[in-house]
Image: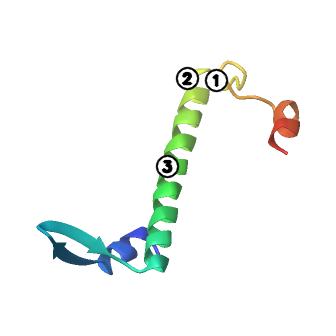
Amino acid sequence: MTGSEALQSVQFVTVKGKRLAVLSADDWEALIEWLETLEDVAIAKEAFAQLKAAGGDRGKAGWVKWTDVADDVA
């Protein structure tokens, strides 16, 4: 399910004057995953824009070599 499909399955209720959205846990998780994907795409676009601005030089763009950080990630 995509985030937009989850948004179509949402139900709205009003409780004590507040409008609330109600969706299933599966729909909620799908929506969060969709939002995280959008965020990842934005980060990648920004990184590639920085690389382009640096004339393709990964070091000047602030990119690091995987071999330099692999032990930190593991």
Kindly give the residue lying farthest to the front in the view shown. Answer: 16
Nearer the observer, 10 or 59: 10
The residue depicted at 22 percent of the width and 76 percent of the height is: 12
Of label 2 and label 1, which has the lower sequence position? Answer: 2
Q: Is residue 60 left or right of residue 37?
A: right
Name the residue carrying label 2.
Answer: 53
* Numbered disc in front, either 2 or 3: 3
**What's the mark number on residue 73?**
none
Q: Amino acid at mark 1?
A: Ala
**What's the mark number on residue 39?**
3
Name the residue carrying label 1.
Answer: 61
Q: Amino acid at mark 2?
A: Ala
Q: Is residue 8 left or right of residue 58?
A: left
Q: Is residue 27 left or right of residue 43?
A: left
Q: Quadrant of residue 72?
A: top right
Question: Would you call the spot at circle 1 few (<14 residues within 10 Å), some (14-19), or many (20 or more)?
Answer: some
- Proximity of marks 2 and 1: CB atoms separated by less than 8 Å: yes
Of label 3 and label 1, which has the lower sequence position? Answer: 3
